[in-house]
Image (tube, coloured by chain):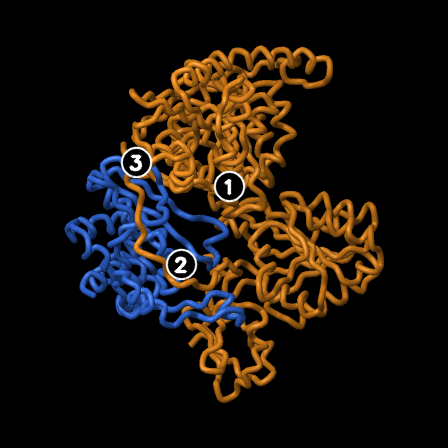
Amino acid sequence: MKTTSVMIVGVGGQGSLLASRLLGTLLTDEGYDVKVSEVHGMSQRGGSVVTYVRYGDKVYSPIVTEGECDYIISFEKLEAARYAACLRKGGKIIVNTQRIDPMPVITGAAEYPENVLEQMKASGFDIDDFDALTPAMEAGSAKAVNIVLMGHFAACTEIAKEKWLDALEKVVKPKFLELNKKAFDLGYGA
Amino acid sequence: MKKLLIGNEAVAWGLYHGGLGLVSSYPGTPSTEITEFLALHDDIHSEWAPNEKVAMETAFGASLAGMRAACGMKHVGLNVAADPLFTLSYTGVTGGLVVCVADDPAMHSSQNEQDSRHYAIAAKVPMLEPSDSREAYAFARAAFGLSEEYDTPVILRMCTRIAHSQCVVDLGERENVPMKEYVKQPSKYIMMPGYAKQRHPIVEERTAKLKAFAENCPFNRAELAAGSDIGIITSGCSYLYVKEVFGDSVNVLKIGMPNPLPERMILDFAAKVKKLYVIEELDPVIENHVKALGLAVKGKELFSAIGEFSQKTIRDAFAKEGFMLPNVPEAQGAAPAVPGRPPMMCAGCPHRGMYYTLVKNRITVIGDIGCYTLGAVQPLNALDSTLCMGASVSGIHGFNAARGAETEKKTVAVIGDSTFMHSGMTGLVNIAYNATNSTVIILDNSITGMTGHQQNPTTGYNIKGDPAAKVNLEALCRALGINRVRVVDPYDLKACEDAVLEELAAEEPSVIISRRPCVLLKYVKPKAPLAVDPEKCRSCKKCMKMGCPAISFRDGKACIDQTLCVGCGVCGQLCAFGAIGGGEKA
């Protein structure tokens, strides 16, 4: 099969590392050749973060560049636009409609583009936007936004839900498993 | 056992399975996880050293004692450890010794993008460079044998992309390597001129032997493509990008040992192709060597010495060369331009209160390396310089020596607790000894923050989280010759301002320890979030001047994000109208 490329993007601290671990573990269990590329250090301090996951029969590069991405999973509206140039023609963006102001907006140096997703839809982007924060709170923690989004993405894939849940069990601490399973379910159905 | 591993975890497994008995490192992105993963094993000695020089010398001591040992650091850390490295090349080893160094092309989390390969060449030691986690495991494991066979330290070079990318690795078992007997060998290990003169020829002979080894070693390989007259010499992650673009359709010489290079192999490879390219990130190290062999080759004229590469870099360069490449990706389209999202200090970060005080009083700030370097960004713009670890304390001394009383009263140095232990102490001794009236602020957040919470000698815990000797910073600064040492809580703006103004006014050097643990530490329990009373808020935006990410301006009033705020209360001290309240536990 050809290589599939996924980007998980958001704001440092939103839990993109756990999301990529979940996806990486699942795809490895499914027998794919998998490459995952994470970001550590400076960019985790509230900066824009991007994680790449690529899988297929044989994957060389761990990163995704312009026009190569099949799915962008964005934890925040602005970040969906920031990385949109990586989306291939016909690719899909799943985005949490949460708004997190970056420092240039907080200081008044820049405006938060309110209707950025609408503009992108109008120009032909396939955008699946929904509020992931409310179901995360319903599951028990605002921090579960990552798993709500992965649950929603899971419904787009051909991999059975049970396999996703098995992988979730492997990457989440037992103490938080029930919360995350609930978050996953809410995302899957959203 | 097959596992999906980041490169650094793969290195840790490779070292462990290769018989490592001791690891000593200083944290630094992107190298930190190597040592963190090694520390999970209880049958070896693991530690965070105060700096990279100490780490490498500790690994040297273990090697001298007959144990396989390693040290880990980022590229700039190797500058700090360069002194032992160059002479370790002369002494060689008893137990195998591996120096793990991680470069940071594109400077994701660094102050420069120097190329560590120059060190291997300059110090005349072999260097291995994996392309992915599988090779990271295999190369780290093999490095000990190479080190012992050729009696040399071996540098294992990682880079950000390989250190933090995952692929599946097939892990073996730990090799049982007994310690070698300790035998006193003065002519090998005492590097005074008489003995060192005997060792240098041995180093040159070793290099000749390593060159011969490079021709047939498991680290370099030619991947030939029938019918192609293109040849690409490449290494590290560039190899992955080349394969991503070309698959098996061009000839590739994959270099896994960038020093010493396999000259015969390169000449043979070049003879098989019509057009020769070198694709390597950062400096033209392989390219210059290939050119010195008299070969016509294209390298840096097509591939920049700046930043990271990707498959797109390769595609774009070869398109310019007139290649028709298959499967060129087609983007969906362009999205609207959006504001940047630079990293920043967290909500409730204890450094913020001190920085606000410094900015408010228009103080010149000689900065250092750590989370607190983020005080340089909008809206605080608090820093005047950041050079390298420890340079704040030595730098302010030179600054004040140059400008005298004019700046002594309005300049401070800021340095974190871990950075102070790393290389701030010697600068402080210099301030006391050579007498400038300098003021140093130690931003003590009780952890090594930026690299992801590593213990250090001031925290009272070791790498395992077990209680350890705790350096008393106040007593240390006094012992180093500073009489005026005081501690403030950076959440208390009045106390910060009093301390800063009084110490700047004092007619002798002083240290202010701005002490409060990092808000991300597990034992730091956040208070209930604060809220703005819109009736009382006069929209003056004073609370926004300190750059807290939890505070934004909505519908003409300040607004506090309830999921981000940790109730530190600093913004409440800024509000002249008492509009910010709450914060007590319900």
Q: Chain of mark 3?
A: B
> Does A93 appear above or below B109?
below
Q: Position of residue B35 (x, y in %)?
A: 47, 38
**Residue at image mark 1:** B104
Corner quadrant of residue B542: bottom right
Whole-Å distance between the Cαs marked 2 and 3? 30 Å
Which residue occupies 52% across, 51% down? B450
**Residue at image mark 2:** A82
Q: Chain of mark 1?
A: B
Among the chains pictured, the one given orange colouring is B
Q: Amino acid at mark 3?
A: Val
Of pointers 1 and 3, the one earlier in the residue sequence:
1
Q: Position of residue A134 (x, y in %)?
A: 29, 70
Task: Say left or right for B327 vs B270.
Answer: left
Q: Is residue B8 visible?
A: no
Q: Position of residue B377 (x, y in %)?
A: 58, 60
Label 3, residues with CA under 10 Å away: few <14, some 14-19, many ≥20 = many
Whole-Å distance between the Cαs marked 1 and 2? 23 Å
Mark 1 or 2: in front is: 2
Label 2, residues with CA under 10 Å away: few <14, some 14-19, many ≥20 = many
Mark 2 or 3: in front is: 2
Among the chains pictured, the one given blue colouring is A
Q: Amino acid at mark 2?
A: Arg
Q: Chain of mark 2?
A: A
- Could you say which is closer to the camera, residue B501 or residue B463? B501
Q: Position of residue B416 (x, y in %)?
A: 61, 52
> Which circle marks residue B168 in the picture?
3
Q: Amino acid at mark 1?
A: Asp
Task: Say left or right for B584 vs B479.
Answer: left
Q: Same chain, marks 1 and 2?
A: no
